[in-house]
Image (spheres, rainbow, N blue to C red):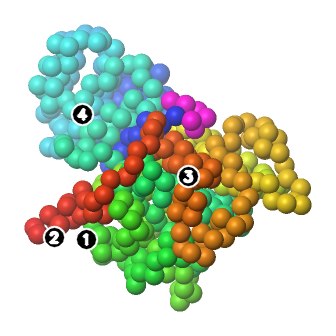
Amino acid sequence: MSDDGSGAERLIAPLPRVTIQAFCESQDVADAIARSAADRRMQKAHVKVQMGGAPAAVEAYRQSPTPNVIVLEFGTDRSEILGVLDQLASVCDPGTKVLAVGHVNDVLLYRELMRQGVSEYLIAPFDVLDFIQAASDLFATPGAEPLGRTIAVMGARGGVGASTIAHNIAFAVANTVGTQTVIIDLDIAFGTAGLNFNQDPPQGVAEAVFAPDRLDANLVDRLLSKCGDNLSLLAAPAVLDRTTDLTETSIDGLVDILRASVPTIVIDLPHTWTAWSKRLMFGADEVVIVATPDLASLRNAKNLFDALKGSRPNDARPRIVLNQVGLPKRPEISTADFAKALGIEISAIIPFDALTFGTAANNGQMIAEVQAGGKTAEIFASLGASLTGRTETKRARGGGLFDPLLAKLSRRKAS
């Protein structure tokens, strides 16, 4: 995995709200599981790590209910392993999954463990993502669609054009890469996605956010506003009839529903630092920080970059997009100095072009529609391909909006 944001990240489904208890024999395995528990994909899971191995687990559950997942580290003695599993089976509650960790790459042992009801066998040593992948796979639905990728976009400060960048990235992913995409405009009071796509839907993201008890796939389907063959929008109402004092987990349900059915979700985050915006940003598969070449942007971009880098050690670094570069008569920090201060290459440099961007904004269009084949449109196409892990782009094919999503939703309605 690349640490500079240039490569496609290993996409692993976040774990649901489950309890995981690990019983380890070696400190190295215990430490690896503890590091895994701190990863963003495990934020809903409750993980407890203790020593003692499988015998300690058998003793612990003689009088206590078992968790959703038990992680057991074994030694190399096959007969001992199978014997302890027999003891565990006598105290284990139905439905509990067992993830075995061993130190022997033995096909016969693996088959015997599977025969005795072990859900997965992981060979030590392993890295953090190996463990998370194994734990995540325990809850994967057989035959389910691949998990959707979330891309969070936030401005380093107000006025840098982060929403415009987010919308054009989404448009590029949908039309140039050819991937079905949803934009979520979470600037609920002042969002511009509706304007930028020339849409005025009667309902949008507010209905999903403020009524979490009614939220399901059918409601999300009704709230989606079509912007193209592969692109749809959850627009912000942009009215001031209520404040947006959301709880930390207010957006979780909406994102979970979309991830289950849509390949790419672009989250247009407002420039604000709240529990819910931080959670979405830190929990996204890809993060884009949009800045302009000035001191305030550099300071804020570095703060965001450092916070994300420290809290997401197992993820690609955030992408930095410099916007409005070359504004006449404005002193600017050079791209090289900006990149040096952050210790990372700039992912994209968007030149200042008041005419093209202004025309697009006033017409409710994207840059590729106003200036097809232009340099800036190509930048967005390249950035969209990189963010979705594509090495080459393709022409979008015709067809209905989100055919797989709508097919699934139709089946649910019919049932």
Under mark 1, the amino acid is Asn
The residue labelled by disc 3 is 373
Give the magenta-colored segment's residue range. Answer: 1-6
Q: Position of residue 402 (x, y in %)?
A: 30, 60
- Closer to the eye: label 3 or 1: 3
- Residue in the foreground of this view, choosing between 37 and 231: 231
**Tag 2, which secondary structure?**
helix
| Earlier sequence position, callout 1 versus callout 4 | 4
Q: Earlier in the sequence, mark 1 or mark 2?
A: 1
- Between the C-alphas of marks 1 and 4, the distance is 35 Å
Query: Residue 387: in sight, yes or no?
Result: no
Q: Which residue is mark 4?
A: 98
Mark 2 → mark 3, Cα distance in angstroms = 42 Å
- Indicate which label's residue lies in the foreground, 4 or 2: 2
Residue type (three-letter) at the residue carrying disc 2: Lys
Residue 2 drawn in magenta: yes
**Residue assigned mark 1:** 218
Q: Are marks 1 and 2 in contact (CB under 8 Å)?
A: yes
Q: Are marks 1 and 4 in contact (CB under 8 Å)?
A: no
Name the residue tied to disc 2.
413
Of labels 4 and 2, earlier in sequence is 4
Crowding near pointer 3: few (<14 within 10 Å), some, many (20+)?
few
User: For residue 167, which numbered disc appears in the image?
Assistant: none
